[in-house]
Each structure stands twice: as C-alpha cells, then as structure tokens.
Image (tube, rainbow, N blue to C red):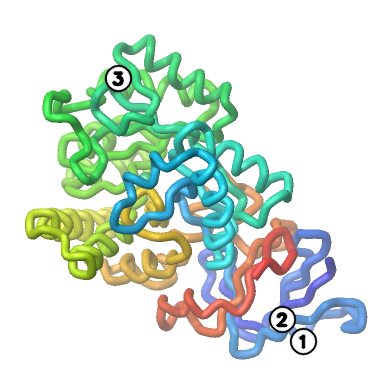
Amino acid sequence: MHLLIDDVQLWDGTGSPAQSKMSVEVRDGRIHWVGAASQWQGNRANVRVVDGRARTLIPGLMDCHVHYSSPGGPEWIARFTDPLPEISMRAIELAEASLRSGVTTARDVGAPQGVSIRLARAARAGEIRAPNIRAAGTWIAHRGTYVSFARQFGEADELRNAIRTEIEAGVDLIKVALAGWNEGARPQDAPDIPFDKKLLAVTVEEAHKSGFKIACHANDVTSCRIAAHAGVDSLEHGMFLEAGDLEAMAKNKTYLVPTMSVWDAMLYYSRSVDWPEARRKRAEDLRQGSRAAVTAAIKAGVNIALGTDAGGGAARHGRIAREAELMVECGMEPGDALLAATSNAAKLIGEDERGTIEEGKIADMVLLDANPLENIGGLRMIAAVFQDGRRVA
Ligand SMILES: [Zn+2]
C-alpha cells in the first residue's frame, strides 16, 4: 500500500512542536518520507492521497493497561468468570473497538486462562482486527490475596516457578498483584502485605534475568511504597503514592500508569446504577487518592505512560481520550499527555519501531479532525486510523 497523507498538521511524538503543511508518505507498512507538503517529489497519480487539511496526524495511540477479556462496566469483576467461549469471543470484539478508537498498540495486563496470549498471537498473525498486543498472561499473586483466577504462590520457589510458567506460556511481560482488587476482593484473613519487599525482589530478579519487564499492580499506601522502591518497570494505578515513593520511582525510572478512567467510571456508575453510599464514598476516595498521586508525580518528574484499565476496572473499552483528559485535569500539558500515550508508552512497552512518526518506523498513525494540543478531547474526533500502513478505521 502506497499512501500519502497530504498537507496535514503533524505532531510526530518526538517531542518537537507540531508543524503545519506537512506530508507523510507510507510504503509497505512503513513511514517512507516526512517533510513539507511542498517538497514532496512523487507522482500523485501513483499514490492514494488522504486529505490532511484542517487535520492533525499523530502516532498511533498506546494503551499500556487493558484487559480485553472483560468489558468493564458496573460489574466488571464478575465478567472475568464468564464462560470461556464468551470471554474469548468478546476479547476479539473489544480489541477491535479499541483499535477503532485509535489504539494501535496495547498491553493486556491480565486475562484468565491465557486468553490474552492467544489474542496477541491472532493479532500478530493478522487474523483479527486488533491492536498490536503485548500480553501478560495471568496475574501472579500471593495465595489467598487476589482473585481466584490469578496464578497463586506461597513461597519464593513457587513464585519463581510461577514466573517461569508464564514465560513458557508465551507472555510478553510479567504482571504481579501487590494489593487486592480495587473492590476489596481480598479475603478477610489474607495477609496485609501480599508481596513483601523480599518476594518482590525475587520477582524483579527472576523476570529481568530472562529479559521480561514487570508491571506491578499497587493501589494502597503499603503496596505503592514496596513497588516504588523495588525497581519494577511500571507501577499500575498508584493511588496514595507519597513523596518518597515518587522520588524512588524517578530514580529507578519506574513508570507510573495511573488508570484514572477507572475511578471516573466508578463515580459515574455510583450515580447511574444507584450504588450504596459506602461504595460511592470508596470510589470518591480512590479517585482523590489517584488524582493527588498523578499531580505529584507530574511535579516530581516521574515517567508517566497512559493506561485506562479498560475491562479490568470499571472503565469500558474504546475510551482512551477520557484518560488523556484526566491527565490534563491533573496538570499535564496536552502535548505531554500525548507523549504518555505514544512515545513514552513505547519506551515502557519496548516498542522501538513504533510511537513516533519518523522515516523508517512502522506506519501506525491516527488522523484527527481536531487539534488535540488545543483541546485534548480532540482525540475523540477520529478521521482515520492506520495500522502497519493500512487504514483500519
Ligand atoms: Zn488492570
């Protein structure tokens, strides 16, 4: 496919300001040429021309925290134990919805029974319409502290085995759960600290030794403190992170993936489906804890990558624009929110050939009928989505 996106405002994700009147030529799935529209030398009769006027072209978006096995919504945890055929079929639909919203790469950070690994393979083989997926297999959690379908361990040796089993199953990264699920799924008699410092150090050593990154679910004061100091690659959720934790994260180059869409969606459901007062109050507390942490993380210079937790929390799929809006509400510049959703996310995921619009890179791009640098909500105004140089939405 030979394509020219012509006369467009280009925000390329490299950190340079947007440039107007640019053109981008795509050949065989890659970005072949980028330059001033007036400088393009080719023959218009030989390319498919896409009108870029009054539009902005950005790199394909990356959602660093999704669960395609579940649809989100007010009863999101129950959906994880739906019958496997239903989970599998639904995952294909949800991945496509995500792609249509501009997500060309996603990290699926936990699914029952290896569904995400199969989904990632089908996507890679071009058999389904889905983002480029990096799958974490299932969650690894201390016995009795997390949902029943996580991979459970007791002692350090069993933990090492759990990581090796995930790697053998074909995962792209390791996901560990340091705290209970956000609706208090932790049983009454479970230990307060599911992973102590020592067990998390074992995890980091075992995964990094095999070249795998670790995403770490932490959503209370204790688990955030342990995760922030452990040298994991990303800390997911991160409500109630404190100043010392953020300092450690900046020093360790640990990414924060805030997933603020979850609390935003929960608050909405608390009104629209009449949750009891205590549950509504909890959602409000989590939301405030999350916003405070993100605002402080921005000031502390912590690397931030965008993740919605669509499916895994209350948030539904295909709403990545909302997460970017929430980041801007917490004090991020729109351009920085876009970096969190493109090139910074690519660095966290380890996608060297994606995340920016530069010659030679894979042609994953989103064309918008808006300028998201003026109003980040413009991410909803999708004119086209290109994946590997092909138009997919
Ligand atoms: Zn999640």
* Label 1, label 2: how far apart the Cα atoms are: 5 Å
Residue 36's mark? 2
Residue displayed at 23% across by 23% down: 196
| Residue that lies at the very extreme toward the bottom in this rendered image | 54
Q: Give SS at disc 2.
A: strand
Q: Which amino acid does label 2 sit on?
A: Ala
Q: Mark 3 points at which residue?
A: 199
Query: In the image shown, does 339 or 162 lie closer to the viewer?
Result: 162
Q: Give SS at disc 3.
A: helix
Residue 38's mark? 1
Q: Does the residue labelled 3 lie within 8 Å of ligand 1?
A: no
Screen quadrant of the C terminus: bottom right
Residue displayed at 34% across by 18% down: 153
Q: Can residue 305 be seen in this view?
A: no
Where does the image place residue 368, in percent across and percent down from the top left? Answer: 56, 79
Q: Quadrant of ligand 1?
A: top left
Residue displayed at 33% across by 65% down: 327
Residue displayed at 71% across by 86% down: 51
Q: Which amino acid does label 1 sit on?
A: Ser
Say if mark 1 contacts mark 2, CB within 8 Å.
yes
Q: Is residue 226 visible?
A: yes
3 vs 2, front mark = 3
Q: Which amino acid does label 3 sit on?
A: Leu
* Label 3, label 2: how far apart the Cα atoms are: 54 Å
